[in-house]
Image (cartoon, rainbow, N blue to C red):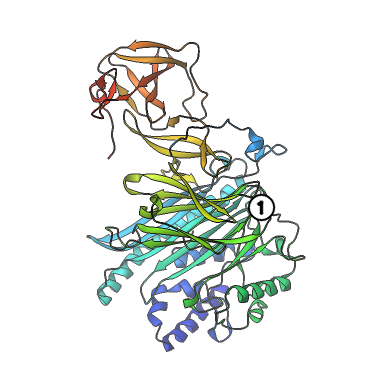
Amino acid sequence: MKSAIKKGLALIILLSLVLCGCEDSVAGSGSEAGDKAAPAEESTEAATGEGSDSGEKAEKGEAEGDTGAAAEAEAGEETVEATDSSDTGADSASGKDDLIIPLVSHQYIDRYEGANRLYYSKYDLLSLGKYSDDYPELEKTLSSRNDEIKKEKETDADERGSEAKEWQKEMNEEAPFYTVSRTFVKRADKDTFSFVVEFEDFLGGAHGMNGMVGYNYYPEIGGEIPLSDVIKDNDLLNDVLSDKLKLKYPDIEWFEDLKETFSKYGKEGSDYTYNWVLENQGITFFFNPYEIAAYAYGRQTVTIPYDEVPGLFTEKIKGNDGQYVSAFDLYDEVSVFDGDGREKKLNIDADFDYDSYGSPGDYPVKALTLYYDGKELKDEDSPVAYAYEHDMYVVHTGDGRNYVYIDCYQDNDWHSVISYELSADGIKRLKETNGSFYVSSVSDDEVWWHPAVFNQEKFELQHRADMLSTVSSTCYYRTGKDGNPEPYTNYFTITSETVIKSVRPLRARYMGETEDLSVDAPEVGGEDEHVTELPANTGFRLWRTDNESYVDCVVEEDGKHNVYRLIQETDKDYNRMIDGVNIEDCFEELFWAG
């Protein structure tokens, strides 16, 4: 019934826009506006968000499929001691961590005719990774969602590619069709698992479509959290939303009086449903284009802190007053709470370098501008200013400090994390840390995953190391008192399984034995250290490095995994040497990346 109503409303919207000369826009967006449309009197509203209860989960998946996109450092000098589970949010009663660190996988689809790009799609999958055993029902929900999205996207790509081919020919255009979405985890703990899917698509016409879809789950049972479990008084909610929207967006001409609009939301049997996401210190509502105002006004958002309106919230969902990390995207408005609990607004805009050699949708930026509580900082000097992609996180510490970490993806797969401090004095750029949150792991079906958020008390950054070969390495960090990532150790663990064979005897320092090559392996070295000579044809498995002067290697000898340290020096001509011999002359082959 809902689908039929929405499709009927799409025709009404189409007729309305035809009268004002915007029929190409609707034709281009296709079912995007129609499938997100809410019933409205005289076609004044469209594109509501998702259902407020688990019964509308299937409809949410349908809406995503139709839109195509909505379906979905270097180590410092000082190191810190490892912390126990009490420092990383462990729940000793249940044996589970308070925090969940889910994994995300970015997926890409392209359709070409010769060299002509017809269509491309970007979307995300989610998994609980190592937390799957703690929350098996939630993992089942996410896995089922992933399967549906992948199937929908592959089927959709061929159809969209054919449509784009006809449109390009008819309009004498070269621009491809696209459906792009990103998933941002807003809250992930033992009580609530919430994320948003932000989408943007262009399928012909005057303009594309964009919006956000919120998802909220109980981790233990894997079911969606209904709005009725969060909000106690719907009438009060409608009044609060109306008042906040009018105050925040005074220049918008609403389709009708907002209190009248919201009086239709949440009623039994009503198609009007709120689109929302639970965050750590409040609930955020999204109103996508065409929902309560014209497309030109864009998307409207309202955050209501849990402690702001007495009598509004139930007791089932609690706020998180401790530490947390939340992901967000360019242009998103993010609510940030300082030490005294006051809400402040953060958003980041980009200036793109359209004269660059990048392709549409992949241009690097010239600068990022951070806006926070009425202050701003334009960064055009750090790596954020020449990166192609940015992963952004708000880091809120247990004592109320706030930081922004931006993972910058640059040329040659180089990553840097730039940190910024948010305070009453404004925004301050802190430090650049070489490395990335893209600590990759691969699943059985060859899907690559990396953390969607991180635990600020202990997280990994993946690094590129160029010591005796180009390899991937990792190190544990925590958010330090100065806000910068602070390493646990003064070395990196090499995760690439790289073995190099010597062609000459080499002097090395024996450090001890190890059976554990993981990042969690204990340190080696001590009283048994001594310098020895290893013969030619010795195989060295690269294991640890400071990325400056040494590499610890594992050598198999008599069934033991012995660790030897090779010291690398640089001569006056910047040649890398071991025992005064160029490293290229010490081994059969070294493996370098550009």
Quarter of the rendering containing residue 455? top right
Q: Residue at point 35% right, 53% down? A: 386
Q: Which residue is painted at 32% across and 65% down in the image?
A: 161
Q: Position of residue 200 (x, y in %)?
A: 44, 65
Residue 145, relative to residue 588: is it above or below?
below
Is any part of residue 548 visible from this angle?
Answer: yes
Q: Say which amino acid is labelled 1.
A: Gly
Number of marks = 1
Q: Quadrant of residue 252?
A: bottom right
Residue 271 visible within the image: no
Asked whether 125 or 548 is in front, the reply is 548
Mark 1 closeness class: few <14, some 14–19, many ≥20 residues within 10 Å: some
Q: Is residue 69 above or below residue 443?
A: below
Which residue is denoted by mark 1 in the rendering?
Answer: 339
Can you give x and y, in whole percent of width and height, for residue 8 in the image?
A: 51, 80
Residue 146 coordinates in the image, percent (x, y) = 49, 53
Vertical position of residue 230 compared to residue 101: above or below: below
Residue name at image x 53 percent, y 84 percent: 43
Quadrant into which the C terminus falls: top left
Instruction: Give SS at disc 1.
Output: loop
Relative to 311, 139 lies left or right: left
Residue 159 screen position, x and y as percent: 36, 66
Nearer-the-camera pick, 354 or 64: 354
Query: Front-most of 550 and 35?
Result: 550
For the N terminus, the quadrant is: bottom right
Residue lying furthest right: 311
264 or 530: nearer the viewer: 530
